[in-house]
Amino acid sequence: ALPGAGATIASIVAYGQEKRLSQNPDELGKGAPEGIIAAESANNACTGGAMITMLSLGIPGDSVTAILIGALILHGIRPGPLLFSQQPALVSSIFIGMFLANCAMFVLGISGARLFARLISLSKAILLPTVVVLATVGAYAIRNNPFDVGVMLTFGLIGFLMERLSIPKAPMVLGIILGPLMEVNLRRAFQLNRGSFWATVNSFLKSPMAMGILIFSAFILLLPWLQRRWTERKHLGSA
């Protein structure tokens, strides 16, 4: 339920975590079921998480809930903590609708699994041009700007080179997506502290929630190193 993150980041993070914890990480990226399940389950789970922040805090969890907030405001409904007491029928309808949608997706997934699996067996001569055309149309349709198509092709080339050089792509994708969000909130923090760097750092260190997030982030960053050390010691002990 990270505000502003959305399904893309959730899929990347879940895939990276699965690759980190998998007993056969080299198989991921080659069609391993574990990687597909991790990314797609995180993608689907983000729908409910984005709705939590939208309904309870009035903060969009992704682009879809941002549109929903705009639609609700146009109808005179302000998402936030008071929504549950002022519009209980609306909140209940949203919950029921999400439950029914998940049931429908379950039935669709079970009944169409074999049909969807056949897409994998398509020839690359058919699949790759189709993906390129859809990606080009999608990039152009966002703002009707040919420059966006150039950006897509450039980053496609960068991604290809990173794949050839065995450079992980997830950190770059996370940086591109989260970078603007971080910059906006950093400017907001400086404005609240009248542009003082040390006052901003001091207010951050005084917040228990901020310190908890900082400690948790440090632990997540150190976790791969700790796992490698534990594995090395285990191998040395068994030898």
Image (tube, rainbow, N blue to C red):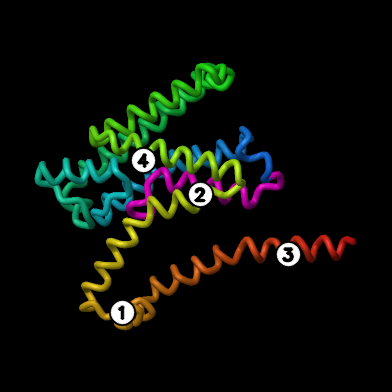
| Secondary structure mainly formed by the magenta segment | helix
* Location of residue 106 with respect to 93 vertically, above or below: above
Q: What is the quadrant of residue 15 in the picture?
A: top right
Q: Is residue 4 magenta?
A: yes
Q: Is residue 133 above or below residue 6?
A: above
Alpha carbon distance from label 1 to label 2? 30 Å
The residue carrying mark 3 is 230
Q: Nearer the viewer, mark 3 or mark 4?
A: 4
Q: Residue at x 34, y 61 (%)?
A: 182
Residue 231, x across and y down, in percent: 75, 60
The residue where tag 2 is placed is 170
Q: Position of residue 151 (x, y in %)?
A: 36, 40
Label 3 neighbourhood size at 10 Å, few (<14), some (14-19), many (20+)?
few
Q: Which residues are magenta?
A: 1-24
Determine crowd level at label 1: few under 14, some 14-19, many 20+ residues with C-alpha closer than 10 A. Answer: few
Mark 1–mark 4 Cα distance, whole angstroms, equals 34 Å
Cα distance in 3D space between marks 1 and 3: 39 Å
> Which amino acid type is shown beneath numbered disc 2?
Ala
Q: On the image, which quarter does residue 187 sit in?
A: bottom left
Of marks 1 and 3, which one's residue comes earlier in the chain?
1
Image quadrant holding the C terminus, namely: bottom right
Residue displayed at 23% across by 77% down = 195
N-terminal of the pair, mark 2 or mark 3, is: 2
Q: Which residue is mark 4?
A: 151
